[in-house]
Image (cartoon, rainbow, N blue to C red):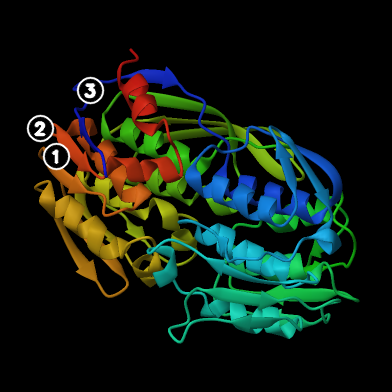
Amino acid sequence: MSESVKVEGPGEPFAAAIEVPGDKSLSHRSIILAAMAEGTSTVERLATGKDVQSTLDVVTTLGVEVDGERISSPGIDGWIEPGAPLDCGNSGTTMRLMAGALSGSPITATLIGDESLLRRPMRRLVAPLEALGATVELSDEGTAPVTITGATPPTACDIEIPMASAQVRTAFSLGAVRAGGESTITSPPGYRDHTERWLEAMGLGKKEEGNTFRIYPGAVPAYHYVIPGDPSSAAFLWASAAIIPGAQVVTPQISLNPGRIGFLQILEAMGATVGGQVTGAVLGDPVGTVSVQGNGLRGTEVSGALVAASLDELPLVAVVASYAEGITRVTEAAELRAKETNRIATTVGMINGLGGGARELDDGFEVLGIGWLEGGTVDAAGDHRIAMAGAVAATGATGPITIAGADAAWVSWPKFFEALEALWSSR
């Protein structure tokens, strides 16, 4: 049974420093790399949401032992052939990245998920993984179940993909690292390059000119991972601070990968004061502190590489845009229609349902900034980002907002509503 939560905004400026949970994207990657490595790895600050638990459950089924921060694996050659499909829950990242790892394994496995995940597109995996010699079987609609028969060893190859997809690039790289020779992958810009930075730091790859990454064959080493804070989670706090003039939030130890900070660039273009300082790195991936302060907001245009660098945060862009002056237009974001929900439709429905002005475009949406939203109800429709964006919409709303299906937020941030309340109550 879904849970409803009533959210009432602060009504005045707030100021707080809040540490957000470990990055979900990096948590998935650390688990899978640890599962591919022979020996024991450790992962500190692993994300706690259901999506990451799905990845832990999948590798455990393959014979990997998980004990708190310790992940002990026989190595990919020792994975156990599963007797049943591997359930990825609601996590598209789990499904796509595990498909890549399995493409270089000696086993055959089928990946399934919940009703939402079974509708999401997987066809883009086929050509890259089959180029490595793996066999990939999908439904007639190009969706899960995804059955992978690995190639041992994979065939070294050079490929180019038409989309700026970190998940496809990562899936290919996880298979290619098992090949008998060097491979390369090229795509348009705008993707997150977490995996590539990590593989390069491990001596298993190198960034080349443009958007090409070269993968060197070799064994993934056991490693000690320290996961930084998730910028996709912090974005909800940043958005809330941007909405109220004089409000401020500081988020320490956040991943500052260039492919993850598009939302900060959008907030700055809209008039918020954004500060950032790199304080360290994890395997060549920058980590630092981010501050956001609210000022008067104005509409902006979001397209191209900026869309790829902020895709998960685009529902939040619509919320912030409602409190701005002028029109905000998001285009070249048709991929939003293939997320947990059709996020173009659910985002526009959320804004209009709260008294705002938004309309669908073929590849995005427009929001007319009127400077406020009303109270009301937001149906999360099983989508964690709509649930959380709806709660942030209450920041400056004229009345409380009820999130129907608020438990969808547990997929990525189980304590989100408590964190938002703590932010708003800080002075």
Label 3: which secondary element = loop
Can you tell which mark lies on residue 398? 2
Q: Is residue 335 visible?
A: yes
Are the residues flagged by discs 2 and 1 in contact, CB closer than 8 Å?
Answer: yes
In the rendered structure, the answer to whether residue 64 lies left or right of residue 387 reads: right
Q: Nearer the viewer, residue 25 or 76?
A: 76
The residue that disc 3 covers is 10
How far apart are the alpha carbons under marks 1 and 3?
A: 14 Å
Quarter of the rendering occupied by the N terminus = top left
Q: What amino acid is found at the position of numbered circle 1 in the picture? A: Trp
Label 2: which secondary element = loop
Nearest to viewer (mark 1 / mark 3): 3
In the rendered structure, the answer to whether residue 371 lies left or right of residue 88 reads: left
At a point 18% along the width and 22% down the height, the residue shown is 11
Q: Where's residue 148, x and y in %?
A: 66, 76
**115 over 19 or under it: above or below:** below
